[in-house]
Image (tube, rainbow, N blue to C red):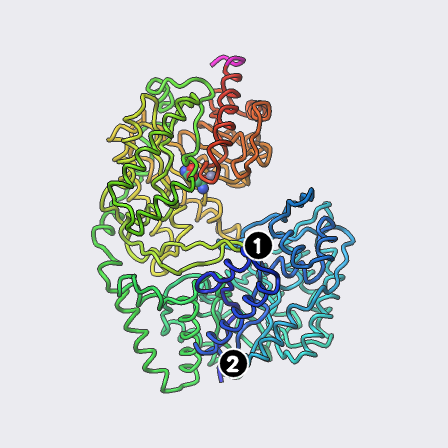
Amino acid sequence: MTQAINLGFPRIGIRRELKQAVEAYWRGDADASALQMQAKALRHRHWQLQHAAGADIVPCNDFSLYDHVLDTAFLFDAIPQRYCALADADPLQGYFAMARGLQQDGVDLPALEMTKWFDTNYHYLVPELEAGQAFRLRGDKPVAEFLEARDAGARARPVLLGPVSFLLLSKSIDGSDRLDLLPALVAAYAELLGRLADAGADWVQIDEPCLVLDQDGDDHAAYRDAYAALADVKRPKLLLATYFGAIGDNLALVASLPVDGLHVDLVRVPQQLDEVLAAIPATWTLSLGLVDGRNVWRTDLDRALALARRAHAARGGERLQVAPSCSLLHAPIDATLEHQLPADVLRWLAFARQKIEELRILADALDGMVSAQGSLEVARERIASRRASKKVHRDDVAARLASVEGADSARPSPYTVRRTQQRARFKLPAYPTTTIGSFPQTREVREARAAFRSGKRSQAEYDAFLAAETEACVRAQEALDIDVLVHGEFERNDMVEYFGEQLDGFAFTKNGWVQSYGSRCVKPPIIYGDVARPAPMTVRWSQYAQSLTPRPMKGMLTGPVTVLQWSFVRDDQPRERTCRQIALALRDEVLDLEAAGIGIIQIDEPALREGLPLRRADWKAYLDWAVDSFRITQSGVRDDTQIHTHMCYSEFNDIIEAVAAMDADVISIETSRSRMELLDAFVRFRYPNGIGPGVYDIHSPRVPDQGEMTELLHKARDVLEAGQIWVNPDCGLKTRGWKETRAALVAMVAAAKALRSDTPA
Ligand code: GLN
Ligand code: ZN
């Protein structure tokens, strides 16, 4: 019998119960046992839900109070010195201190660094390791959760992050080689596996997602050594799980490891099935990742079945499992709760629960059960209706896309020509000052929006409120003597949602939360159809703000790559095509802003870098279409219209050529946290256009003084031309209060002015 097995379930709860519970604990409104009780209730509910949806085996130890990589570090006692005393005295406090830092009673513990989990929007905490690091089991979370599942009547398979991926995802704080720690770490894994076997676990899912990355000879040796060391210990059988991409050139290595089974992602890479079938031992169990674990669409079950049947024909049904492509951590929980969605769109969606139902159908169909036929028929009908929908496929959008020509992604003149015209038009001083767009989203602003959305405030009242906020913001910037102003973005809740709500082809869920990190969840829009812009989106507020001041008012848009990256996207056409559709819609907005007299327009692309594919070999193709999409958005304007872009990250070195190819007249970037290290990129590569290296970190309430900013600007001047440099904070100010914002901007403007007086313009 083919088994339907899940690899991981969202932890947060359909109503974000886990978020409420941990935040109550952090605030001191609930104690540890209340938190643990809520966590336990969620685990039970989720196991039950998965079995009810048709899973034969459910995952356990996939649950986490904050992050599963942090759990792994904690479990093996990879706890940096600074947290040890606390972790010994109160493990839960120690755990959360690693996650979030702790500032209390004179203690000041910075948190572990956080970074993106592969190419998802989930963020994990980066374990800190050092030479000679000892590992031991601290607590027994995986065993306890396995026993808990069993007691709850669930048939559970524990999930562990594998030792090699754990080390590769960690960072060494002393420059030592993380992989040197492997023998010590593997010994602790061996002990854990023994305990799981004693507890009655027959299988363990051991995740080695790094096997889909570019791995070198040392990495390969590490996998070989790790699994050789685990080959002969007392342990459950090991299902090695890979996901998020192709095993590719790591396949021969994988097939040589002494494990008992393999999970492969056949959603991202269906074409890897045949080589996997050819490579792996006949005795292994093969888990087929057939249902997309990180998107929201119903699976084309016929297509999935065709793949599964190939595996079935090659190996028989005995050791075959059907599974999602990866953990369902990245999907919302239940689509049936989204009644407010258009009925057709709703029928096309599958969240975690529906995905498990699909696995059941696949397993039954594979086993030839007649009962599966009816379900397949319904599924077929849903896929067909999506394929035929005029809401999804619009002739006007297709025609527009087909008509795009090379000239549409190039400004009429090169930057040097544009620069001359823009200088003549705007007459800005040297080291012009500006901000990144948003000003403080105070409680008042958020309350006004909530009141408007719930109908407690009329449109007219809300508009009057926004107008007053915008005017106050303009006056504040004038008083600060900032050169290029912004309207403040008070009308925006979120930089993607605000645009999605005004574009065709987007839908929004009520409960479609996915975990971003810790207790923070996001509700990404769903792009279900061809994207078009029925009417201008931002012109009104930009135009109003410009009418208040003689200074240039910067129009503010979110760029096509960022809109794409922070949404659930269509799986029925390449990402590239969706991105170009968004780019064309935004191009019209740029042109409307220009026609309305807005001379400077910023197109934010903070997510450009995070869209990079996992394998280097795929970077160029991505960067080509991502950069081209940005260029389509910006290129319709006149030479004397100035296009800005903004990116908030500092790892810049490896994509600087692509960033330059975007050909924005001015780019603002994060540099303050990295103390301008990123400017190294500009030593190697002469970035030609204007550039605003962020001179202070807006992520902290700390107000830097003028001296610090001057010092950073001097560093910038060492590697850039004085005439290139803009002066701005490193990101939008929406999370800050007015008091610290004002103080920081006073210092920033003073730093710019001081620089002007010692440099000829
Ligand atoms: N314009 C946006 C803002 O200022 C940019 C936000 C971002 O970079 N993430 O809020
Ligand atoms: Zn930013």
> Is residue 687 highlighted in magenta?
no
Q: Nearer the viewer, residue 451 or 618?
A: 451
Q: Residue furthest right?
A: 132
Distance (Cα) linking label 1 and label 2: 37 Å
- Give left or right: position of 152 versus 540: right
Q: Nearer the viewer, residue 330 or 3?
A: 330
Q: How many tags in the picture?
A: 2
- Give the main secondary structure of the magenta stretch: loop
Q: Nearer the viewer, residue 330 or 655?
A: 330
Badge 2 marks a residue whose secondary structure is helix
Percent coordinates x, y for residue 78 in the rendering: 71, 56
Percent coordinates x, y for residue 289 in the rendering: 48, 69
Contact (Cβ within 8 Å) of mark 1 with mark 2? no
- The residue to which callout 1 is attached is 124
Between circles 1 and 2, the one closer to the viewer is 1
Q: Which residues are magenta?
A: 757-761
Is residue 58 shown above or below 439? below
- Give left or right: position of 394 versus 185: left
- Give left or right: position of 476 versus 719: left
> Is residue 758 highlighted in magenta?
yes
Say the numbered circle drawn on residue 315.
Answer: 2
Percent coordinates x, y for residue 107 in the rendering: 69, 44
In which image quadrant can residue 62 be found? bottom right
Q: What's the residue type where badge 2 is placed?
A: Arg
For ligand 1, give the image quadrant.
top left
Looking at the image, which residue is at 54% across and 56% down?
24
Looking at the image, which residue is at 73% across and 74% down?
233
- Give left or right: position of 445 versus 701: left
Percent coordinates x, y for residue 379 in the rendering: 32, 74
**Is residue 119 in sight in this rendering?**
no
